[in-house]
Amino acid sequence: MAVQGTVERKYVYDFAEGNRDLKDLLGGKGANLAEMTNLGLPVPPGFTITTEACQEYLATGREPDGLAEQVAAHLTALERSMGRCLGDPDDPLLVSVRSGAKFSMPGMMETVLNVGLNDRSVVGLARQAAGAGGQAASAGSTDRAGSAGADRFAWDSYRRLIQMFGKTVCEVPGEEFEHALDDVKQARGIRDDVELDADDLRGLVDTYKKIFRKHTGRDFPQEPREQLDLAVRAVFDSWNAERAVLYRRQERIPADLGTAVNVVAMVFGNLGPDSGTGVAFTRDPASGAQGLYGDYLANAQGEDVVAGIRNTIPLQDLERLDKRSYDELLDIMARLERHYRDLCDIEFTIERGKLWMLQTRVGKRTAAAAFVIAGQLVDEGLIDLDEALHRVNGAQLAQLMFPRFQLDHEVQAVARGIGASPGAAVGTVVFTSARAVELAAEGQRVILVRRETNPDDLQGMIAAQGILTSRGGKTSHAAVVARGMGKTCVSGADALDVDVPGRRFTVAGRTVSEGDVVSIDGTTGNIYLGEVPVMPSEVVQYFEGSLDPEHIDNALVRAVHRIMTHADQRRRLAVRANADTGADAARARRFGAQGIGLCRTEHMFLGERRELVERLILARTDDERERALAALLPLQRADFVEIFREMDGLPVTVRLIDPPLHEFLPPLEQLAVNVAVAQERGEDVAQEEALLAAVRRMHEENPMLGLRGVRLGLVIPGLFAMQVRAITEAAVQCARDGLTARPEIMVPLVGAVQELETVRAEAERIIADVVGDSGVEVLIGTMIEVPRAALTAGQIAEAAQFFSFGTNDLTQMGWGFSRDDVEGAFFWRYLELGIFGISPFESLDRDGVGRLVRIAAEEGRAARPDLKLGVCGEHGGDPDSVHFFHEVGLDYVSCSPFRVPVARLEAGRAVVETTGSDSR
Ligand code: ADP
Ligand code: MG
Ligand code: MG
C-alpha cells in the first residue's frame, strides 16, 4: 500500500500541455484554452487544475495531497514567463481564477478577476500602468493613459477584486457592494461606472473593505497566495451551489463530474478607451445566418459584457475603433470555425490595442440555427451528412414544430428588443422569479420581465413561458440560459423602463403592470401588448406537405428536409404512429408514419354508444348481451374502415378494448343522486337502479390492476369476438374497394400464454370465417406490458405473431406505482434526490424496465425468429428511448403523430451515433 502512495497524481496542467480532447480532465474552458494556445493564438499564459482535484476535494473536504506544491510550481513558471510575481508591490502579476466544467454551465459557477491585488500592489499596478514599460503599457499608449487614468484603472481593478472575491468566495451579499457603488454614482451625479475617477474608486475600496469585514469578521486578505487558494477552493465549492445543482438537473449533466479551475494571467480591458472586452459568435446563434454577431464594450472588464450591466455596441463598430484588432479577431474567428468545424463562441479582451483570446467553445445555438448551420457546414465541405445528422436532435426539431405569431393583421409591436431565443410566448407579466413560480403553479402562463436576469432567477425562468429583459445582448445571462432551456426570450429591449419594486414597466408612454398580458417573439425580438394569435410553424407546414423545400427560399425548411431525408435513409427502425381516428391517421401519414402502432378502440364505446355499453353490462341473458354487441358491431366496423382507408397499404395495429367497462358508465355519486331524485319524483327507476348496482358491483380498489384488458375479454363472452369480427370485416370491405388493409390485432395485458391462446383460438375461427377468399391477412399478437409477460416471452411468442411493448404499463408495473398518483406525490423528491435523473415515464428506465424489454425481445425472437417487435408507449417518441429501442433491435417505434418526425430523426441519429460530440 505504502509503495503505491508514493506516485503523485498530476493535478495541474499548463495550457501548453492540454488539448481540446481533455474536457473530462481540464473542463471545457481549460481544454479549449489549451487548444487555442497550441494553435498559436494570443492566449494569456496560465494553467488548469483538474476536475480530479475537484472531485477529491469534494469527496474528502480538503485539497488533495500534492496539489499545493504543484500549484506553487506552475505559479512560479507562470511568474517567470511573465517576468513578474503574483501581487508584487512594485510590478504585480495578477491572475483570474475561473471555473470550467466539462459541459458549459453559463453563469452557473464562479470567476474571480484581479487576484493578487492588495493595498501595496494596487499602487505598483497604477505606476506600471502609467508608463515605465510595465505590463499594461504598450508602446505609445502612456500619454493617453496618463497617471490619473492609470490610478483610476488600478483602483477600479482593486474594488472589483474585493467585490467579486467577497461575493463569490466569502458569501458577502452582492447587493451591498452594488448599493455602495450606486451611492457614489448618485452623490457624484453620474450614470456610468467609467465616469468614476480614481478618488471615487479609492473611497469605494475603503467602503468595500468595511462591508467585507462586517460580513466575514476579518479583513480582506492581503496575502496574494491566500487569495489564490481561497478562490480555487470557492470554485471547487461552487460545483455544489444550489443554482449549479438545479442547472445540472435541468440539463441532465451528471452530478459527480466536478469542475476544473483555470488560473490565467490577467489582461486588462479597463485601461482606457483603447481597451475593452467583448463576446462574439462566428455565426448568428439564433438563425444560423453567416456573419458577425457579437457585443463589445470599451474600457471594461469581461464581467460587464456578460452581466449585461452596461449597454454594449455591436461588434461591427469595433472596426471603427480599432481596425487592427478587429481584422485580427475576424481572422482568428475564421480559423476557429475551420478548426472546430462548427459555430464557435469566443470571449476576448483588447488591452491597449493588443487582442487577447480568453475563451472559445463550440457555441450553443437555437434549434433553427442548429439545422441551418449543419446544412451550411455540409455545403462548405467541413462535415458530411452523417455528422450533420449527429449535430441536430429531436428536442430541437420538436421545438421548431411549435407555433409562431400570426401577424397578417393590425398588430403593431410596441417595442423591439433582441431576438435571443425563438418562439412565440404569450402570458401575464410578472416581475419576480417567485411570482412567476406562484402563478405558473396556478396554471397561468407568465412572461418574466426583468432589467436583466441573474442565476437567482432560474426558477422563474423555468416556470415562465418567456423571458423579457431591458438590458443585455444575445450573450446575456437571460439569452444564454433561455436558449439552453428552449424558452422564448427577448433581451435588451431598452425602450422598456422596468420598475421591479413597482411591478410595472413603461414603454412608448404606456404602462404595463403585473397581470397585463404581453406577447413576445423570440425570433424577431418584437414585443406586443395583449395577446397575439399564433400560427403553425413552417417546419410543420413542410411536414404537412404544404411547403415544397425545393421551391421556397427558406434556409430552415431546406436544411430540415435535407437532414430528415438523410435520417430516413440511414435509420433501421420504422416509425409508426398512435392514432385512433381517420383524421389522426391521415396526419400521422403526412408526418411520415409507416403504419399505426396503436389504435385504441376505447373511444368507440363513448358518446352515443354509451347506451349500448350500458345494455351490454346490464344484460341478464345471453340474448340481451348478444343484441347489444350486434348493435355495436357495425359502428366499430365503420370506424375501422375509415382508418384502414387512410392507411392503405400500411399495417394498423388495433388493440382490443383495454380499460375496465365501468369507466364507460357514469360515476357512482352521480348515479346515486339520479336515482334518489327520480325516486323522490316517483319516477320509474328500475334502469337507474340496475346501473347503480352494476357500478357498485364493479367497483375496484385498484382498477389499474383489476378487470381490464384480456381479462375482460375472457370474462365477457362475445366482446372480443365482436371486435375481431368488426376489424376483419372492415379489412375485407376495404379489399373489395381495391385497397390493402393490413390489420394486426393486439391483445392487451397478457401475462400468461394461456390467456393469449384462448383469445387467439376464437379469433382465428372468426377471421377464417370472414376473410374467405378476399386475400386479407390478419396478424394476431400481444402487448408486452406486464412484467410476467416479459419474463415468459419465450412461451408467449409461441402464440403471438408480434409483440408491442406497452412501456407505460410496463413502467408502472415494473416499479409498482400508478402514474396518476405518484407524479404529483413524490416524483419531485425522487428527482431531487437523484433516484431518477428523469421521470421513467418520460424516458425509459434502461436498467430496469429496459431490461424487461431486452429479455422479452431476445427470448421472443429465440422462440419465433420472425416475431415482429415494436413499442407503443409514449417512450416511442422520446429521443433517448428511441436510441435504446434501436440498440435492442426492435423493428419499429410508435408515437403520437406530432412526434413522428422526432422519432424518424432520432432513429437515424441512433445509427450514426458516435461518441465525443462537441455540440452539447
Ligand atoms: P464564465 O464561465 O462565466 O464565462 P469566465 O471564466 O469566462 O466566466 O470569466 C468571465 C469573464 O472574465 C470573461 O469573459 C473574461 O472577459 C474575463 N476574464 C477572465 N479571465 C480573464 C483574464 N485573465 N484577463 C482578463 N479578463 C478575464
Ligand atoms: Mg466565459
Ligand atoms: Mg397498457
Image (cartoon, grey):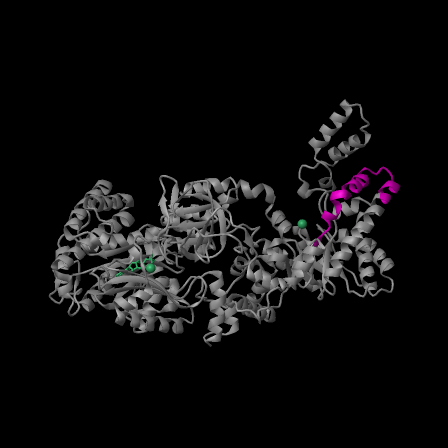
Task: Please tell me which residue lies in front, 127 or 50.
Answer: 127
Q: Residue furthest front?
A: 410
- Check the image and report above or below for 521 versus 498: below
Answer left or right for 625 relative to 866: right
Q: Is residue 279 visible?
A: yes
Answer left or right for 866 relative to 83: right
Residue at x 72% of width, y 47% of height: 603
Question: Any magenta on residue 845?
Answer: no
Residue 501 place in picture, x, y as percent: 35, 39
Quarter in which the C terminus is drawn: bottom left
Question: Any magenta on residue 604?
Answer: yes
Answer left or right for 872 relative to 630: left
Q: Residue furthest right?
A: 623
Residue at x 27% of width, y 53% of height: 231
Task: Please tell me which residue lies in front, 459 or 236.
Answer: 459
Task: Please tell me which residue lies in front, 758 or 697.
Answer: 697
Question: In which image quadrant can residue 112 be found?
Answer: bottom left
Residue 23 place in picture, x, y as percent: 38, 64
- Check the image and report above or below for 696 versus 608: above
Answer left or right for 229 relative to 420: left
Quarter in which the N terminus is drawn: bottom left
For the image, the number of numbered tags is 0
Residue 37 place in picture, x, y as percent: 30, 70
Question: What segment is highlighted magenta in the picture?
Answer: 599-627
